[in-house]
Image (cartoon, rainbow, N blue to C red):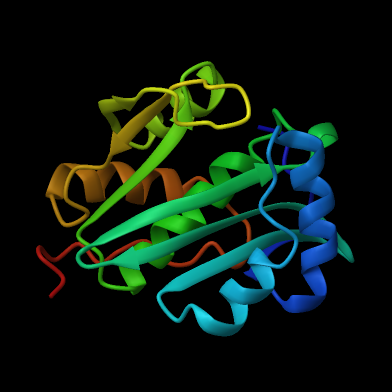
Amino acid sequence: MVLIAGVVVDAMREADVPEVQAIERDVFLTPWPRNAYYRELAHNHAARYIVLRHGPEILGYGGLWRVGEEAHVTTIGVRRPDQGRGYGAVLFAALLTRAYQMGARWVTLEVRASNDVAIHLYEGFGFRVMGRRRGYYTDDGEDAIVMWSDSLHAPAFKARFRLRVAALTIPGVGPPPPVEYPIR
């Protein structure tokens, strides 16, 4: 992992949206609609959106929703020139930290069936393939792989996550969850 000094995880702000959308248009076939991030930031109190900053530049972003006892990763992306440097792992760890802070018990996500790099990243955090949504992506009809965490409060999941977070030295990722089980 080649992480640049001075990189921080921060809450996404409205002023970040144009740069986030530029990244999204570059890395995804179907970016979110133009006003989606503005709506999410202003009105969705069950959501958290973050960016990975290096000075004034945004290297990547991510978001999740809390729905009942689960957190659902809605989006995560890293600028094309910065892919392969570990920033996706940083963003994902920061999203999981926010899921803990929001009181979620599980985390779920969908990922393109062809995105082996992302699937491997999520598996490294202890996520497992739990299903497949046929034709999920409307742009090309590709299937989505549905992945779930174990209980965020399970000792084995927490221990793995604590090790992953301890290896990251980027401000804003957040503290790992407490060792006590469960935290509620």
Above or below, 181 against 43 in this view is above
Q: Nearer the viewer, residue 133 or 4?
A: 133
Query: Residue 99 at x, y = what percent?
Result: 36, 63
Give the left or right position of residue 19, taking residue 3 as reference.
Answer: right
Give left or right: position of 57 versus 162: right
Residue found 58% across the figure and 47% down from its top: 76
Residue at image position (52%, 28%) is 118
Measuring from the top left, give residue 16's x and y in whole percent.
79, 69
Looking at the figure, which quarter contains the N terminus?
Answer: top right
Q: Residue 184: tell me if it is visible.
A: yes
Residue 110 on image: x %, y %: 41, 37
Measured along the vertical axis of the image, is residue 53 above or below residue 163? below
Residue at (53, 59) in percent of width and height = 63
In the rendering, at what x and y percent does residue 28 appear? 70, 35
Label tally:
0
Looking at the image, residue 155 lies above or below residue 71: above
Residue 56 falls in image quadrant: bottom right
Q: Quadrant of the C terminus?
A: bottom left
Q: Quadrant of residue 173?
A: bottom right
Q: Is residue 6 visible?
A: no
Front one among 21 and 142: 142
Residue at x 57%, y 72% (from the top left corner): 40
Residue 155 as seen in the image, left or right of residue 164: left
